Amino acid sequence: MSKNLNSEIKALNPLIADPKRCTQAQVPSLLKPNCKNFQQTQNVDTSILDAQVVRNDYIRFVLDRKGILHSNSKISLSMKLSGTEHPAFFPFPTGVYGLIKKCVLRAGTTILDSTDSYGLLSAYENQMLGNDTALRKERIKSGFVNARKSQKVPSINAQVLNGTEIASALSYDLGREFAVTLDTDGKAPVGDKVKTTIHENQNLVNESDFVLELSTLFSSLRFTQLPLFMIDQPVIIELFLEDTNSHRICTPQGGTLPVFNLDLDSPKLIADYIYYDIDTMNNFASQNSTMSLPFFEHQLIRTNVNYSTTPNFTRNLGGAGKAISMIKIAHNEPDSADRHNSLINDFKSDIHETGGGDDVAYNVKVNDKFLFPVKVSNVCEQYVNTLEAEGLPLNLSAREYQDDLGTDFTNVELIEDHQQPASFNGQKRFMSIYNLTGERVNNRGLELHIDVANGSDKSLLQNVWLQISKTLILQNGRFTEIYN
């Protein structure tokens, strides 16, 4: 078993400590996920809750006020075909998370954690999952596809398979081999193309259940578990869903767009509640009648920009009076026609036309001082800045990050009849910037400076998420919110 997969399996076990999650000094040990080993006294009770409100574009759950909410709790749902049957699947970069336009976790009227345009942000954050996790876990659980493999394809140009091979190239790994159908003469089809198809559980026609993890939707829950037994306010989870059919699913190349709606009977919250012995729970509540918990939220700033006509772009991002630890940037084209006829829909970040290349330089002004002495223009340095901001490498190729570096993906193996180079090259130009100053932003806010040479002559949507730190104070059963 690989190290990455073994780590993922361990993370599902509430009795196994994870040192990376045990470093938040503000969080009491009892609320740190997988940090205390109470093998003698810990109990986990699982409840399957129906949604209190469910529509094609909205789901709301209300948690029971008992125990401590385990961060590995999950939401399951499925899609239902309406009309003529045609194959369809969730976009590869997001899986089922591409359904989510906005997710909100709140206690009463106090927002604990919230992210807007979540589907696009998840397309970026999913790139940090390892190959084994993507292939063996997420592909089945959420329909997300991001595993890679080195692919060798035999030479089949109107010949019987003869053992000769085309040079190996990168290919997305669906966990199955390509199919070759020989004609009546025992020869392969013309064109040196082989085809791979998605698994049956990924085909929405089969109405499979997909799973979303709360700790993925609400990243604060990776470090803090909610003491529901101490909260007098109703704790609510709200999911605002993408309701435009072509914006949330993909089809095989040239395929007809079917109509899939949320199965209104399918949303379930699989909530795991942790309990300890009665003395431990009572002592914890009495010793922490006033408790400060670190949380953070993603504030989204969006604007339309055409880098061909505005190659030097400056925008004030706001954030005055707040502690902003990270800036995440993505560019997409939400109004692009026929966006479903692809493997990724519009869950991508690209600045240029395919094959055109881009020269991007950026800097951020924090409290009247630039974060970098000069604008960062080297693509490798931009990737390293992203890696350092997140603390994890992106599981993508150089050609996915910037198209003009060449071609990584095989043009021989088709996935659902889509060519991989056209689908993936240059489509993951995500950028993150860590705020090295550690200072609270003054009343002038943050300024983002981006210069783009050879940008596409098209209107792009620039999405910028500010990761804002805040403190939630739980006192007498009620939360109040303070920005750090």
Image: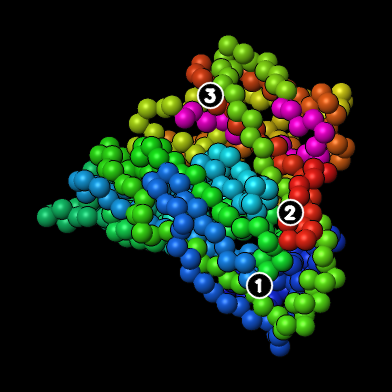
Q: Residues within 10 Å of mark 2 (few under 14, many from 20)?
A: many
Cα separation, mark 1 vs mark 2, equals 17 Å
Amino acid type of the residue tagged 2 in the rendering? Phe
Q: Residues within 10 Å of mark 1 (few under 14, many from 20)?
A: many
Give the number of the mark in front: 1 or 2: 2
Residue bearing the label numbered 2: 479
Cβ atoms under marks 1 and 2 closer than 8 Å? no
Please state, as top left, top right, bottom left or bottom right, where the N terminus lies in the image.
bottom right
269 left or right of 362 in image? left
Residue bearing the label numbered 3: 460
298 left or right of 369 in image? left
In which quarter of the view is residue 323 placed?
A: top right
Cα separation, mark 3 vs mark 1, equals 46 Å
| Secondary element at tag 1 | loop
* Residue 161 numbered mark, or none: none
In magenta, the rendered stretch is 317-334
Q: Residue furthest bottom?
A: 40
Residue at x 73% of width, y 82% of height: 278
Cβ atoms under marks 3 and 2 closer than 8 Å? no
Q: Residues within 10 Å of mark 3 (few under 14, many from 20)?
A: many
Q: Residue furthest left?
A: 184
**Residue in front for this viewpoint, 462 or 398:** 462
| Secondary element at tag 3 | strand
Cβ atoms under marks 3 and 1 closer than 8 Å? no
Q: Earlier in the sequence, mark 3 or mark 2?
A: 3
| Residue 155 at x, y percent in the picture | 32, 50
| Residue 455 visible (yes or no) | no
**Residue in front for this viewpoint, 301 or 168:** 301
Residue at x 52% of width, y 37% of height: 348
Amino acid type of the residue tagged 1 in the rendering? Gly
* Residue 67 numbered mark, or none: 1
